[in-house]
Amino acid sequence: MFEFLKRQPIKKEATPDAELSEDSWELKPKLAEEIDELKAKLNDKYRNSFELFNNIERARLKLAEPWVPVSRLQREKRILLKALEYQEKESTLLEHISKKAKDFIYKYPETLLPVAIVAGLSIGELALAIKTHLKNAVPVEALTAKDLDSFENIKYLGGIKDPKERAVLLQIDHDIQFGEFDGYVINSKTVEMIVRYTLPKGFAGNLSKIDYRDEIISTPERYGISGNQGARATIELGSVEVSKGSTIPVSIIFAVDDLLTHEIGHLNWTGNKFLTTEEKQELLTKIVERVRSTGRYKSSYVEKINNDNKREELDLKVTEYFAEIASAYFSPTQHYLLPTEDAAIIDELIAKTDPNFDIKKARKRRTKIILMALKKDSEQKIAIAESQIDI
């Protein structure tokens, strides 16, 4: 695995005394931390190989902590970076082989066993390949809600057993955890106001936690869209993670009036705890019809979704379409763009989960919250500018 290193002569490292300068000792903790982070990214195979190689090389050079020189740590860091590069190439190659094998099996099911053996697919992957092939055997134009994974997820996640339970469940105080949003375009208080004062009880009631993650979340490959996600919802946990890396530049207006409601919309989909299984399946059927309609809501995001597996593509589109129309519905500036049929779907959902909700008042509140956030942002920018003036 580290054969490329064998071609490089091992140079005699500097003596410990030569590494006792103040600058060197300041570098060591940082380098050691970087090395630990890089090692953590390696899989077992590459990490074990690195440790074995590194221990042998340190022994040959008679190096031991704390007398490992900075130059040696720098070399170890370079080796780890190269190992990560090799690991990534290997992983990409295996994924490519696996995908090509599965695609071939879908197209020619009679080759299932020999291709799977040659490609090294597991029993679980074989079973999934058979199941997927059977689903993909349905012509694209004949696909219905029952052919989608979302339909299976609804049955798995369940919901209330009887509509009569809904009123009781909605009366229970629901605790939502609002994390810190330091470094984001809006603060935690703004997020909380949007949730508590502009959304129906049923919508907010499916949210348990919303937090900011100071990391980039890549858009899953199955979407066929390059770039990063501004946020991510986890239906099973009822949680939303907002990230710093969105392909669309995140403004205050976009965050408040689009992004947050879109993700909370996902939590009101297959995992909606205020709907029965039958009600969610009925909702799914309606959204499938709308996605296929020429008069649908034209979301640029949904329209871009592209997957060779058309069953999966339809599933992704209906999931995102629901979140998009929910987001537009609550927006004071975008709701008028919604076709009547889409607005009616959200109207019906709200009538079930919060019949006293006043959408007009909610949109006015949201406008005020946006203006407050914009004003605060402007005041902060002015304060920063004033603090930088040399008086």
Image (tube, rainbow, N blue to C red):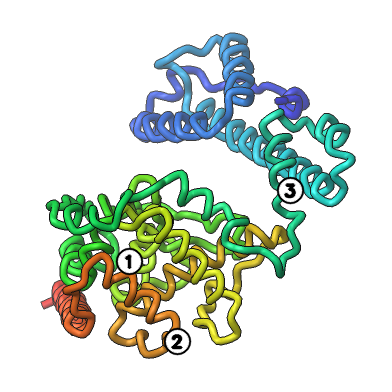
- Estimate how packed mark 2 is, as few (under 14), some (14 to 19) or many (20 or more) residues with alpha carbons within 10 Å: some
Which residue occupies 59% across, 37% down?
Answer: 81
Three-letter amino acid code of the residue under disc 3: Leu
* Mark nearer the N terminus (1 vs 2): 1
Marks 1/3: CA–CA distance: 37 Å
Disc 2 marks a residue whose amino acid type is: Pro
Which residue is located at x 65 percent, y 66 percent?
Answer: 306
**Alpha carbon separation for disc pair 1 and 2:** 22 Å
Q: Which mark is residue 134?
A: 3
- Judging depth in this view, the residue of 42 and 254 nearest the camera is 254
Asked if one can make out residue 124 in the rendered structure from this viewpoint, the answer is yes
Locate the C terminus by quadrant: bottom left
> Residue 260 got which mark?
1
Answer left or right for 28 relative to 307: left
Q: Nearer the viewer, residue 30 or 166?
A: 166
Closer to the camera in the image, 218 or 340:
340
Give the number of the mark in front: 1 or 2: 2
Q: Do tag 1 and tag 3 residues touch (Cβ < 8 Å)?
A: no
For the N terminus, the image quarter is top right
Q: Position of residue 193 (x, y in %)?
A: 16, 68
Work out whether mark 1 precedes mark 3 in sequence or the reverse, and give the earlier one. 3
Which numbered circle lies on residue 339? 2
